Amino acid sequence: MSTHRQVGASELARASWRKSSRSGSSANCIETCRLTDGLVGVRDSKNRSGTALIVALSEWETFTHGVGDGQFD
């Protein structure tokens, strides 16, 4: 189920964004952050001021488990 709550720019600016330690020196990386109300922000690490994708934590966990299981290979 998708959420419809809007996330303001100030909340995204205050968020603690993280990039995977497996990213290395590759320029093709994303960063994620935990937001209020069980949401996760996802953004391009090369364009930190660009648009962020906001998803429910449960959706993000389903996606990351799928990646780990090779569902997108």
Image (spheres, rainbow, N blue to C red):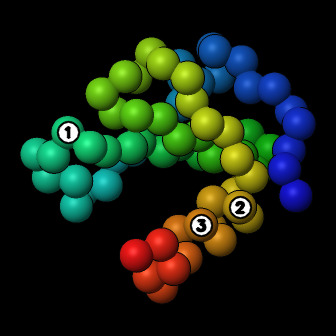
The structure residue drawn at horizontal position 47% and vertical position 35%, both measured from the top left corner, is 43
In which quadrant of the rendered view does residue 22 lie?
bottom left
Q: Is residue 35 visible?
A: no
* Image quadrant containing the N terminus: bottom right
Left or right of 70: which side holds 22? left
In which quadrant of the rendered view does residue 45 lie?
top left
Q: Amino acid at mark 1?
A: Ala
Of the pair 13 and 63, the residue shown nearer to us: 63
Q: Earlier in the sequence, mark 1 or mark 3?
A: 1
Where's residue 41, x and y in %?
59, 40
In which quadrant of the rendered view does residue 49 lie?
top left
Of the pair 64 and 8, the residue shown nearer to us: 64
The structure residue drawn at horizontal position 64% and vertical position 22%, both measured from the top left corner, is 11
The structure residue drawn at horizontal position 65% and vertical position 71%, both measured from the top left corner, is 62
Residue highlighted by disc 2: 59
Left or right of 30: which side holds 23? left
Q: Which mark, by number, is residue 63?
A: 3
- How many residues crowd around disc 1 within 10 Å: few (fewer than 14), some, or many (20 or more)? few
